């Protein structure tokens, strides 16, 4: 009993440190995943672990999330560039590790309020990351006088702005939920509500400063989802109308204070309206993405059934860019900037369907079980991977693999499991 309790405590600590570190450090997650695997092996009880999987449909369904990793592993059979392929497999290893760990996790490891600690750790880590980025931007502005220090890549120190915005928006979704459903069903004190509302404003303002178009759009979607939850699920009609007014006012003020973000949307509109695209010389990147998507879809059709193989996508895209004189993309070896397309190129229609179903089926489940946070998470992931190949980077893979398995296996409302 003591041994199992010790391993459960280690899991809780490692999960919480991992969630805290995601917005702050891109390297530490690899070591933490290694420690989680080590704890899983030292824990033992393998017969009980796997027996629990096969007697519980929910645990077995959690294990199915490893399907995409196994598909990439199968793609190694026919890949030409094995070195690139094994690098890709290594980056995606957490897609196998976390479904396995959570599917076989002892029920007591994250029972009751313990399940909230990794989520609060994520909120705290994101907040500290934001403060450090703002402090760094302030010092840079004091040195150069350039207001651009507070925007986009210059502001986002730890991650690409798209990833940082994704973490911020997820934190907003968590805080929205906690405001509506206190963990212990008690009434919040005024200062507690004030802290959560202040954090929501902080994260929202930071997403605007990051100027990530996907981040701003998903932030709007999360607020829309929250308002719908308040009105249609909680049936607080006047409160919901008040939220519409307050949130609309907040966006109006933030976008007025930081107009750079709006100008990026204007550039995007111009790029979409442009018929002849070269992808060269654009600072926004939208024209570049559209051109890549267009030609990547043609390449995907040529390798419809099995794809190019796990390690051959980069070389194929570079050859494609060279053939259409897209020199900037060729020199930078740009990926498909769309995870659905990236997966299709690597694994064909089978891999694409696995990715799609791994988002759609849990989405249906989260609606049926009224798991607001899990649905919000899937919405954030599903939209962001439309414009980024996020599973090529450790930050994107670990964020998805960890919280997807966590929120599916350990729902916030224990009665809804």
Image: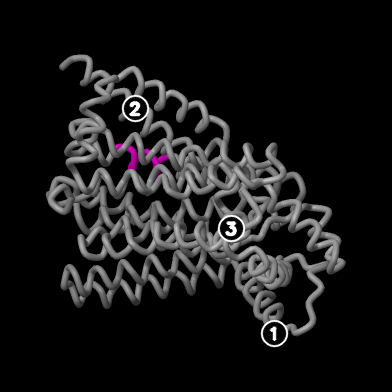
Looking at the image, residue 108 sits to the left or right of residue 170; the answer is: left
Q: Which mark is residue 390?
A: none
Where disc 1 sits, the SS reads: helix
Tell us which disc is closer to us: 3 or 2. Answer: 3
Q: Position of residue 260 (x, y in %)?
A: 65, 68
Question: Neighbour class for label 2 at 10 Å: few (<14), some, many (≥20)?
Answer: some
**Residue denoted by label 1:** 273
**Residue denoted by label 3:** 306
Question: Neighbour class for label 3 at 10 Å: few (<14), some, many (≥20)?
Answer: some
- Answer with mark 3 or mark 2, whichever residue precedes in sequence: 2
Where disc 3 sits, the SS reads: loop
Q: Is residue 314 above or below residue 289?
A: above
Q: What residue do we see at 60% from left, 43% from top?
A: 77
In the image shown, does 46 or 186 lie closer to the viewer?
Answer: 46
Name the image quarter holding residue 305: bottom right
Label the magenta part by its dominant secondary structure.
helix
- Answer with mark 1 or mark 3, whichever residue precedes in sequence: 1
In the image shown, does 269 or 349 lie closer to the viewer?
Answer: 349
Question: Neighbour class for label 1 at 10 Å: few (<14), some, many (≥20)?
Answer: few
Image colouring: one colour
| Residue range highlighted in magenta | 117-124
CA–CA distance in space, label 3 to label 2: 41 Å
Q: Position of residue 323 (x, y in %)?
A: 85, 65
Q: What residue do we see at 44% from left, 60% from top?
A: 380
Q: Which mark is residue 13?
A: 2
Q: Position of residue 261 (x, y in %)?
A: 61, 68
Q: Residue furthest top?
A: 2
Name the image quarter holding residue 152: bottom right
In the image shown, does 148 or 190 lie closer to the viewer?
Answer: 148
Looking at the image, residue 25 sits to the left or right of residue 67; the answer is: right
Where disc 2 sits, the SS reads: helix
CA–CA distance in space, label 1 to label 3: 34 Å
């Amino acid at each position: 009993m003591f041994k199992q309790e010790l391993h459960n405590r280690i899991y809780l600590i490692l999960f919480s440190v991992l969630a805290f570190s995601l917005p702050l450090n891109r390297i530490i997650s690899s070591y933490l995943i290694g420690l989680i695997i080590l704890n899983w092996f030292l824990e033992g009880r393998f017969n009980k672990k796997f027996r629990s999987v096969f007697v519980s449909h929910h645990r077995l369904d959690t294990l199915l999330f490893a399907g995409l990793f196994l598909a990439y592993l199968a793609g190694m059979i026919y890949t030409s560039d094995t070195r690139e392929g094994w690098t890709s497999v290594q980056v995606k290893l957490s897609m196998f590790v976390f479904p396995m760990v959570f599917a076989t996790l002892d029920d007591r490891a994250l029972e009751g309020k313990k399940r909230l600690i990794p989520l609060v750790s994520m909120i705290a880590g994101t907040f500290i990351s934001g403060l450090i980025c703002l402090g760094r931007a302030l010092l840079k502005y004091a040195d150069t006088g350039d207001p651009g220090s507070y925007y986009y890549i210059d502001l986002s120190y730890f991650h690409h702005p798209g990833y940082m915005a994704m973490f911020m928006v997820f934190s907003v979704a968590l805080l929205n939920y906690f405001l509506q459903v206190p963990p212990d069903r008690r009434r919040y004190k005024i200062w507690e509500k004030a802290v959560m509302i202040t954090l929501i404003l902080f994260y929202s303002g930071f997403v605007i400063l990051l100027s990530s178009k996907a981040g701003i759009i998903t932030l709007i979607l999360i607020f829309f989802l929250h308002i719908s939850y308040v009105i249609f699920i909680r049936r607080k009609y006047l409160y919901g109308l008040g939220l519409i007014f307050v949130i609309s006012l907040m966006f109006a003020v933030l976008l007025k204070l930081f107009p750079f973000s709006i100008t990026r949307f204007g550039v995007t509109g111009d790029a979409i309206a442009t018929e002849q695209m070269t992808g060269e010389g654009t600072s926004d990147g939208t024209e570049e993405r559209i051109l890549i998507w267009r030609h990547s879809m043609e390449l995907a059709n040529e390798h419809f059934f099995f794809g190019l193989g796990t390690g051959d996508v980069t070389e194929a895209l570079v050859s494609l860019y060279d053939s259409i004189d897209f020199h900037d993309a060729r020199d930078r070896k740009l990926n498909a900037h769309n995870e659905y397309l990236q997966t299709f190129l690597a694994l064909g229609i089978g891999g694409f369907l696995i990715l799609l179903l791994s988002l759609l089926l849990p989405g249906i489940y989260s609606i049926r079980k009224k798991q607001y946070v899990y649905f919000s998470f899937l919405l954030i992931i599903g939209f962001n991977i439309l414009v980024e190949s996020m599973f090529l980077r450790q930050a994107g893979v670990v964020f998805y693999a960890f919280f997807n398995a966590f929120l599916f296996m350990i729902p916030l409302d224990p009665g809804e499991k």
